[in-house]
Image (cartoon, rainbow, N blue to C red):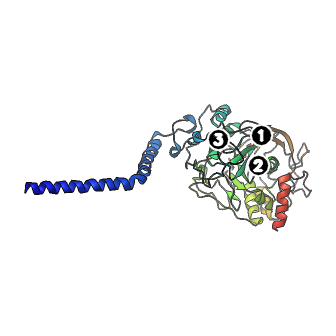
Amino acid sequence: MATWLQSKWRYLFMFLGVQLVVMALLSREGYHKRVSYFISIFRKQENTASGTSGAGSPHARNHTGGDVYANLSLLDKAHGQGEDMPYCPKTSPLIGGPIHVNFPSGLTLAQVARKNPLVVRGGRYRPPDCEARHRTAIIIPHRNREHHLKFLLYYLHPFLQRQQLNYGIYVIHQAGNYTFNRAKLMNVGFREAMREEDWDCLFFHDVDLIPEDDRNTYMCDANPKHTAIAMDKFGYKLPYKMYFGGVSALSPLHYLKMNGFPNNYWGWGGEDDDIGVRVSLGGMFISRPSVKVGRYKMIKHKLDKGNDVNPRRFNMLAKTRQTWKLDGMNTVEYEVLSRDHFPLYTNITVHIGTEAGLHATAPSPKIPAKAPAKPPVEAPAKPLAKLQQKQQQHH
Ligand code: UDH
Ligand code: NGS
C-alpha cells in the first residue's frame, strides 16, 4: 500500500514538474509584458498618490506618470542627421499619453533651454535619428504674456519632440498699445512662417493653453482641425458645437481655401467663430481629436488691458458670408519691425496698425469694420505662390 502511494506521489510530482516547464516555456514571451503591465499599474497608482511633479521635479516621473520630459533622454544627439536616415515610424515610440501639467514658480527660459538641448536657434527641432514625416509650425499670437509663454515653451518643446516632428515655434508679437488683434496676428504668422520654410501644417496656438496628452498629435488632418476640444475651464467639454477657439491646425492649402483669417476683429471675441464659419464657406469640415486626447489646461488670467470685448463682433459675424473673400490673407497689411531667432522660438514683432489702416495714428471710432477691397500689399512668399497655383489647379 505504502509503495503504491509513494509511486503515485512520484508520478504526480513528475507530471506537475513537466507541466511547469511547459508553461514556463510557453509564457516566456508574454511574461515580461505581463510583469511590466502590472508594474505600470502600480507605478500609476504611486504617481497619483504622490500628487504633483512635472516642471518642479524633473526626475520624478516616467512616461506613464505624465512627465513630459520622460523618454527624451532616449534621444541621442550623437546620431547622424545624414541624407540616408530612415523615415520616423508612423506612430512615435516616444509618445506617453497623459501629461501632468503644473506651473511652478521660478522657472526661467534658460532652464527650459537646458532641458531641450536638441532645440536649435529660432526654436527649431528635427529628430536626430530619423527623417520626420511632418513639418509643423506653431504660431502664437502674443503681447505682454511672457510669463505664459515660458510655461508653454516648457511643455510644448518636449511634447513635440515626443511626436518626432520637424517643427518650429513662432511668436507673433503685436507692437504698440493699440487694441489686440488675434486673428490678424495669425495671418502675419502664416505668411512669415511660410517665408522661412515649406511647412505642411500650421498650429495656431493661444499662449495660455497647455496640451495634456501627447496623443493629440500636432499634425494636420484632411480638414482643418480644432484640437482644443476639451479645456479644463469648460469642464473638459466642447463649450458649443461650432467652437473653433484656442488651438487649431490648418495646412497651407486649407488656409488659402478659406482666405486665411479675418483682419478686422479688434479686441476680444468672435474672431474664432468667424474662422469656424470660414472653414465651411471654404468647402471644408472641422475635424477634431477625441475629448480624451484633446485636453488642455489653461493658465488662469483675466481679460488683458488693450483687449476689451469687441462690441461689434456679433454684427461682423452675421456678415462673414459676404466679407470672407474681401478680407483675409489676400488683404493683410503689416510691417515686420524685427525678427529674432531666439534659442527657444522665433520672435516676429509686427506693426499691424488700427481699424483706420496701417499708418493712421489716431483711429476714428466711426470707421466701419468694412474690409479693404485693395489687392494684397505684399507679394506672396514663394511657397505660397506655389500653393496658390496648386489651388487654382484644384478648382
Ligand atoms: N493674447 C496676448 N495678449 C493679449 C491678449 C491676447 O498675448 O493682451 C493672445 C494670447 O495668445 C491669448 C490669446 O491671444 O492666449 C487669446 O486671448 P485671451 O486669452 O484673452 O482669450 P480667452 O478667450 O480668455 O482665452 C479670455 C478671458 C476672459 C474673457 C471674458 C469675456 N467675457
Ligand atoms: C464665445 C465667443 C468666442 C469665445 C468663446 C469662449 O461667446 O470668441 O465664447 O470664450 N464668441 C463671441 O463672443 C461671438 S471664453 O469662455 O474662452 O472666454 O472664444
> How many residues crowd around disc 3 within 10 Å: few (fewer than 14), some, or many (20 or more)?
few
> How many residues crowd around disc 1 within 10 Å: few (fewer than 14), some, or many (20 or more)?
many
Q: Is residue 369 visible?
A: no
Q: Is residue 389 left or right of residue 83?
A: right
User: Marks 1 and 2, Cα distance to the nearest angstrom?
Assistant: 16 Å
Q: Earlier in the sequence, mark 2 or mark 3?
A: 3
Q: Nearer the viewer, mark 2 or mark 3?
A: 3
Q: Position of residue 343 (x, y in %)?
A: 72, 36
Disc 3, SS: loop
Mark 1 residue's CB less than 8 Å from ligand 1: no
**Amino acid type of the residue that numbered disc 2 sits on in the rendered structure:** Arg
Q: Position of residue 385 (x, y in %)?
A: 86, 56
**Amino acid type of the residue that numbered disc 1 sits on in the rendered structure:** Asn
Q: Nearer the viewer, mark 1 or mark 2?
A: 1
Q: Earlier in the sequence, mark 1 or mark 2?
A: 2
**Residue 347 got which mark?**
1
**Residue 332 got which mark?**
none
Q: Earlier in the sequence, mark 3 or mark 1?
A: 3
Say above or below: 157 vs 90: above
Say above or below: 9 vs 358: below
User: Marks 3 and 1, Cα distance to the nearest angstrom?
Assistant: 29 Å
User: Marks 2 and 3, Cα distance to the nearest angstrom?
Assistant: 40 Å
Q: Position of residue 208 (x, y in %)?
A: 66, 44
Residues under numbered marks 2 and 3 in contact, where contact means CB atoms less than 8 Å apart: no
Residue at the spot of label 2: 182
Q: Is residue 19 left or right of residue 131?
A: left
- Numbered label tally: 3
Mark 2 residue's CB less than 8 Å from ligand 1: yes
* Image quadrant where one finds the C terminus: bottom right
